[in-house]
Each structure stands twice: as structure tokens, then as C-alpha cells.
Image (tube, rainbow, N blue to C red):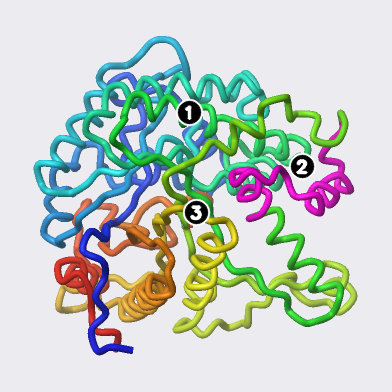
Amino acid sequence: MPSFLTFPEHFLWGAATAAYQIEGAWQADGKGESIWDRFAHTPGKTRNGDTGDVACDHYHRWPDDIRLMQSLGLRAYRFSIAWTRILPQGRGAINQAGLDFYSRLVDSLLAAGIEPGVTLYHWDLPQALQDQGGWANRDTAAAFVEYADVVSRRLGDRVKLWITHNEPAVVAWLGHSNGEHAPGINDVATAAAVSHHLLLSHGWAMPVLRQNSPDAEAGITLNINWTAPASRSAADLDFARNVDGRWVRWFLDPLYGRCYPADVTADLEAEGAFPHGVLSFVQPGDYVAIATPTDFLGVNYYNRVIVRSPAVAEADNLPPTVIPAPHDLDHWSEMGWETYPDGLFATLARVAFEYQAPRIYITENGASYADGPDADGRVHDARRLAYVRQHLVAAWRAIQAGVPLAGYFAWSLLDNFEWAHGYAQRFGLTWVNYETQERIVKDSGLWYGQAARAGGFAPA
Ligand code: IFM
């Protein structure tokens, strides 16, 4: 390996956030209620009852946050739009103040030399649409297209990178099958229908984005971690197939024209996911719409998951995933996620060569560690720095192997609201004091900024 890893000239060195996780101002300037507002305000749903009501107060502090990005030398910033700032009731009346907010943000990013990348849906469905069935209702896919149209008509002249959805698998399975996320539903049949309507809304929105933003790239982001079996036993191997199938292939396959995978369809049928007939929610034309060609695939990669078949786990009284306790925190983040950079290389190769994704962005990658300021006022987060560096080495190796990787967005620019974990988990390159809203760039952020400026780094 060379002593300095140089990345392609136009590689996007970025950082990512999401609206509900950083903006706060949950009722400001005409914003409507989202399912995450409702969920977090419901006792018992998030750790310590934490909410995104204030979060990082980015809605008011965004000029400072842009200056922070500029000081780091970032070339790109991926953020999401809060649907309820634009259409407080989900569809119908447009809230100009919401559009103005994002328009100013985009203008200021461009003025600072930072490329804006917009995610349209990062989990905060308008509650008004949830009240009509949410993503289980096919009509929500039509509402999403209207929303995509309104946003891209306003920002489409300046935004050159559009992501329809962030991690539809998490929305479907965590939001609707185990209830850990908003809207907190626990029903596999609902989750299966939701997954289809999310994908459908993506496919329907693609031509609208192309029309309103003709010079832009548009695609979707999936969470693709590396799944491995705990042993070579038939049961564990089959369970690893099942887990990877429902979290990854169930989404990748239809997006790349292969329809839903038969083995996962059978698994879901056995769980009662199709009470009205197998895949009864698929209508003529849906597969073609979902497989509308995209310009890129966004990959969110964090860790390897080593899975054990539930039958084996129960019989041997073992946990369903292999996580040693206590964790070695050099190798397992505070989320209990294993650091496994080879999995990023393998994942990039998989989507590039098996699915022929024409271009790939790593739209999220990062690790949660609680390190805060030391006596010197600095945040010496050596483990996160090592994590980011190791994953960028894997990304560089993938590029050498022929993967069309065009950018990397660290998760996250700031410590922020980590969904059901509240503020207990910190993923930021920047430490946030939630009492004072002070920001301190961590050592990992300083290192990443240097790499961004230099267009590469020394691997060791
Ligand atoms: O914080 C989340 C983000 O919203 C989606 N991807 C994973 C991150 C860490 O859990």
C-alpha cells in the first residue's frame, strides 16, 4: 500500500445529518407535526424521554454550522428536508417559510463552496399522513411524489445530488415490524406493505426529480451492513441468508430489476406478512417503476453483524447476535456495533459488481463513542479517528479494485439525536454541548478535514 492514499480529484468529501436529528424548532414558522414528533413525545418510546424538540438547534444555528464545515474543508454536505416544514399536513398547502429555510441553506452552502446533497425522506413522515395509514397506504407514495415535486421545483436549479429515501429497510422493519422507531407499529404485514410503498414512491419520484433538476444526479440510500453466520451449521447459514435477505436483497433486488427475492418472500409468507395473498400489494407496473434507473446508489455502512439462528440461540441459551460482553471498545462501538472495515470493501464490491450500480456514494459511515472534552478543552476521540481512517482505507482499496465510488459522507457532522437512543449515543465529528449548544470539533473531525483538504491521507 502506498504511503499516501490519493483519492480521485472530484471525490466528494462530505458529512451527513438528518432534519429531525439536528434541527430542533419542531413547531417553528408553520412546521407541522411529524411521526417522530409524536413518537418522541409519547412516554417510554425513547431513552430518558429525549426528543428532537431542540436537538442541535441547527434551524437557528445553521450559519455557524456552515462556517464549521467550511473551516474543516468539507466539499459536500448531505442533509434531509423535514417534509412537515414544507407541507405541514403532508400534502396541499405549502409553507413558504419552510421552503425559504432550505433555499437559504442551499445558497449559503454553495457560497461557502460546499456541494449540497438533499435527502427527501429521512423518516419524519407528516403525522397527518400517518393518520390516514402512513406508508401502509399506497396513496402516501403519491403524496411523496407531490412533496418531491414541490421541493425540487424550488431547489432543483442548485441542488445536484438528490436522495429519495434514507434506509427504507429501517423505516419498514424497525418502524412497522418491531415498533422500535416511529410510528411504533408491530405488524409484519404492515411492514411488508410499507417496504413496497417506500420503494414505489422512490421510483415514481425519479422522473419528477429529473424533470425539475435536469443536471442533477438522483438515487436512493440503503443501509447495507455485512451479515455473517455465527457458525457453518446449516441453521446459522440459513439464518444469515434470511437476515441479509430481508435487510438488503429485499430492497436491492427490485431496485435493480430483479423483483422481490423468492426466498425472502417465502420467509415473510411463513411469518404471516401476506394476509391478502402473497405480494398482493404489488400492482401492474410497480416493478418497472421501482427499477427506474438511478444515477447512483447511496450506501450506509457501519458494521458486521454475526447472527445465530434463533432456534440454536434458544436451545443453547445464547444471544441472537454475537457480541462479547464486556465489549472491547476498540473493536465495538458504544452502539455494540463491530468495527469491520473489510465489510465496507465487500459491500462496495457487491453493489458495484453484482448489481452493477453505476456510481456509489458512501452516504453514511461512522461510530458512536461518548468521548467529551478533556482538561485541554479538546475531544481526543482516537477510536473514532481510527474507525474513519480504516474505513477510508477500505474505500480507497475499493476504488483501486474498480468500484465507481464517488464520495464519502461521514456520519455525522454533529453529535445528535440518535432516535430511540436519544442523546446517549454520539456519532459526531463535532461534539455538541446540549445545554449551551457549544460545538467542539473532535480530533476525528480535524483529521477528516485534513484528509478532505489534501484529497487523501497517510494510511498509518
Ligand atoms: O443516526 C442514524 C441515521 O439517522 C441513519 N443511519 C444510521 C445512523 C446511526 O444509527
Mark 2: which secondary structure? Answer: helix
Q: Amino acid at mark 2?
A: Val
Percent across and percent down for residue 121 are 45, 36
Region of the chain picked out in magenta, as a range: 248-275
Disc 3 crowd rating (10 Å Cα; few below 14, some 14-19, many 20+) is: many
Q: Is residue 132 left or right of residue 34?
A: right
Q: Is residue 274 magenta?
A: yes
Give the image location of residue 234, x and y in percent. 86, 75
Labels 2 and 3 touching (C-beta < 8 A) = no
CA neighbours of label 2 inside 10 A, class few (<14), some (14 to 19), many (20+) = many
Question: Disc 1 marks which amino acid?
Answer: Ala
Mark toward the viewer: 2 or 3: 3
Callout 3 secondary element: loop
Q: Tell me the CA gap for discs 2 and 3.
A: 29 Å
Residue labelled with disc 1: 205
Residue at 29% across, 56% down: 15
Task: Give the residue type that dot 3 points to.
Answer: Ala
Magenta-highlighted stretch: main secondary structure? Answer: helix
Q: Is residue 258 shown in magenta?
A: yes
Q: Give the spatial CA distance, label 1 vs label 3.
A: 19 Å
Task: Tell me the residue that label 2 is attached to.
Answer: 188
Name the image quarter holding residue 100. Answer: top left
For the residues labelled 2 and 1, the Cα–Cα distance comes to 26 Å
Q: Which residue is mark 3?
A: 357
Precedes in sequence: disc 1 or disc 3: 1
Task: Give the x, y percent position of residue 52.
Answer: 40, 42
Crowding near the residue tagged with mark 1, few <14, some 14–19, many ≥20 C-alpha atoms within 10 Å: many
Residue at 58 percent of width and 23 percent of height: 140
Quadrant location, the C terminus: bottom left
